[in-house]
Image: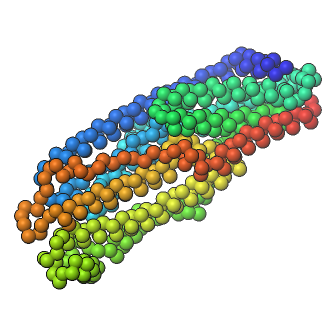
Amino acid sequence: MIPRVVAHELRASWRDGTTVVSWLAVLTMLALSLAVHSRRHAHAVADHARQREELRQEWLGQGESSPHSAGHFGTFVHRVPPPLAAIDPGVDPFVGSSVRIEAHVQHDFKFRAAADEGASRSFGFLSPALVLQLLAPLLVLLGAALRFGGERERGTLGLLLFSAPSPGRLVAGKALASASAILALVTPLALGGWMAADSANERAALGWMTVAYALYLGAFAGLGAWLGLASRDQSRALLGAVVLWVATCLLVPRLASEFASQRHPLPSRAEFEASVEAGHAEGIDGHNPEDARRKELESKVLAQYGMSELKDLPVNFGGIVMQAEEEHRAKVHEREFGELWSTLAAQESTVAGFSLVSPLCALRPVSMALAGTDVPAALDFARAAADYRIEFIGFLNDLEAHEIDEKKRPKRVGTETWSRVAEFEPPDRPLAERLAPNRTSLVALFAWCAAAWLAVASRLKRWTP
């Protein structure tokens, strides 16, 4: 019985020219977006590799210099786009991919892809994830509503129920037919991700992502089937499908985003920068000899070495005071940016709370987390860059304190010193860390899919012509 139902559903879909054209259009758009983003991702990875090598050679080739001047010479650290960013770029185009490392200054992210995109290239952000999140549900909804609504309108549903051993087998057959159609949508996703994945961790993340999208589309297939059964004719079923799509894929996610922004407001850029500057003002000023906090540190260092004057110290006090300034700036950076990122995470959590009324609110955080392009992934990079900056500038300040004699000129170190500075290694998030904060969303996706098809089964059990 079940194989016959599956075959019947697939034949009916194939004979419907409108359905075939619609599916081909969405599959073509999915394939094109995957090709565009895969190519863009490959170029981004190659550019980052080239820039990393150029910056390293630039750093090593700066010649003899004082450690303090080298700190202002600085460098950049880059975040290499994760492999699955070709499927779901997430927040990456909007938060930037590079951070400048420089003494006395905590730089923000630079080189945001979204800022470099003109109106003519806005199609580039129609990612494979966006196609599957917005266009595919509409296609699945309409297809299921048409099939079930058409059978009810033609009176063939009663014959199917009469010939079926049980309504459950009929539902199973139709669910498998929908699963076959969904498989056609997620297969390009799986193939494209498999070619991009460069580790077992990424391939495992791709597997979970494929499951998440299958559950998401399966939920819409069930909802479309229920609408077809509940509506008196096809036109009402189609209208209900469109209204449901607008509500769950457009309206609710937008309202959820606005609600999250109101509940957890972000400070303006001017307010944030003022707060950071106020925090910096509370610390030592490494360039002001009359600064009270500098005087306090001076007394502490003199007591530590048992000296009465700075000139008698066996170390360069300038390096010590600059390191104290950097450590204070790092604490301010961690506090202020930590609060900012916490607010962003709270907004994402609030939006995910709308999963009960919109499957898309459940899918989005899961998709971005598995792709490694969500807010926590960006935060991991920001923290790693801040830690590297402390290590980078700390090494130079240590040189200033212990290898530079204030009484002698020139105050420089040889070029071989620069190779002792380690290169930046971007963090790699294990799959468990990506999944842990999104378990509730995954459960919500499963619940949506199961509830939709259980509703279909319930409707068929008490169905009357």
Q: Outermost residue toward the bottom? A: 308
Instruction: State left or right for residue 177 relative to residue 266.
Output: right
Q: How is the image coloured?
A: rainbow
Number of marks in picture = 0
Give the quarter of the image for residue 462: top right
Asked whether residue 95 appears in the rendered view, the answer is no
Q: Where is residue 233 in the image (x, y as percent from the top left)?
A: 82, 31
Q: Where is residue 156 in the image (x, y as percent from the top left)?
A: 87, 22
Quadrant of the frame with the C terminus: top right
Q: In this view, does 306 lie to the left or right of 146?
A: left
Determine the residue positioned at 24% across, 70% down: 320
Judge whether 139 appears above or below 78 on screen. above
* 239 shown above or below 356: above
Q: Residue 390 location, x and y as percent?
A: 32, 60
Q: Residue at x 8, y 70 (%)?
A: 407
Q: Which residue sits furthest front? A: 306
Q: Is residue 10 above or below residue 358?
A: above
Left or right, residue 47 beside residue 37: left
Which residue is nearer to you in this view: 107 or 122? 107
Q: Which residue is drawn at 59% across and 37% down?
A: 209
Name which residue lies at 39% across and 42% down: 80
| Front one among 191 and 233 | 191
Image quarter hosting the N terminus:
top right
- Residue nearest the viewer, comparing 82 with 399: 399
**Does residue 345 show up?**
yes
Image position, residue 347 (x, y; %)? 56, 57
